[in-house]
Image: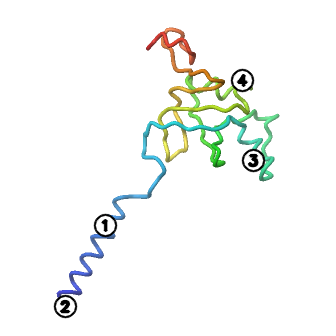
Amino acid sequence: MFKKTVLIVAAIMLFVASAMAGPKQNHAKNDKVTFEGTMVCMSCDLKKADGARSDCKAFGHSHALKTKEGKYINLLANQYSADLLNGEKYHNKAVKLSGVYFANANQLDVESFEADGKKKSWCGSCKSMDGCMAGK
């Protein structure tokens, strides 16, 4: 009887501990990380590869970073990611992005990036992502 009670208590404790730990993720909430890959239009990529019904001509491109493993990392739309998300400046270019990663939403809040051998980060004086580093 005592052994059975101990086993039941141990099982309950193990269950509670695993429930409290929650699901495992690649990155904890608010981790500062660096991702490398190619800036692509995720909608165009999915249309070509998987037949997605995207219509970039009508709705515009939805740029994201595609890692060499094929995972898409979405960029939080703000002043720091505007150059990466808008237009064709970095389309199909290799980039290295650093920032705070929100794993639960697959969103990277960009703090700096490298492209074409140049590092860019936020400049408070210029109010843009550039390489001047005046604010550093």
Q: Which residue is mark 1?
A: 16
Q: Which residue is mark 4?
A: 89
Determine whether label 3 and label 1 are within 8 Å by CB.
no
Q: Nearer the viewer, residue 116 or 27?
A: 116
Spatial CA distance of label 3 from label 2 is 59 Å
Q: Which residue is mark 3?
A: 46
Spatial CA distance of label 2 from label 1 is 23 Å
Q: Quadrant of the C terminus?
A: top left
Across and down, in percent, residue 39 comes to: 68, 34
Locate residue 64: give its quadrant: top right
For badge 3, the amino acid type reads Leu
Rendered residue at 43%/44% (across/down) = 29
Relative to 90, residue 22 above or below: below
Across and down, in percent, residue 81 comes to: 59, 27
In the rendered view, does 12 fall on the left or right side of 110?
A: left
Earlier sequence position, callout 3 versus callout 2 = 2
- Name, please, the residue furthest toward the front: 117
For badge 2, the amino acid type reads Met
Earlier sequence position, callout 2 versus callout 1 = 2
Q: Residues within 10 Å of mark 4 (few under 14, many from 20)?
A: few
Q: Residues within 10 Å of mark 3 (few under 14, many from 20)?
A: few
**Camera-side mark, 3 or 4:** 4
Rendered residue at 63%/43% (across/down) = 67
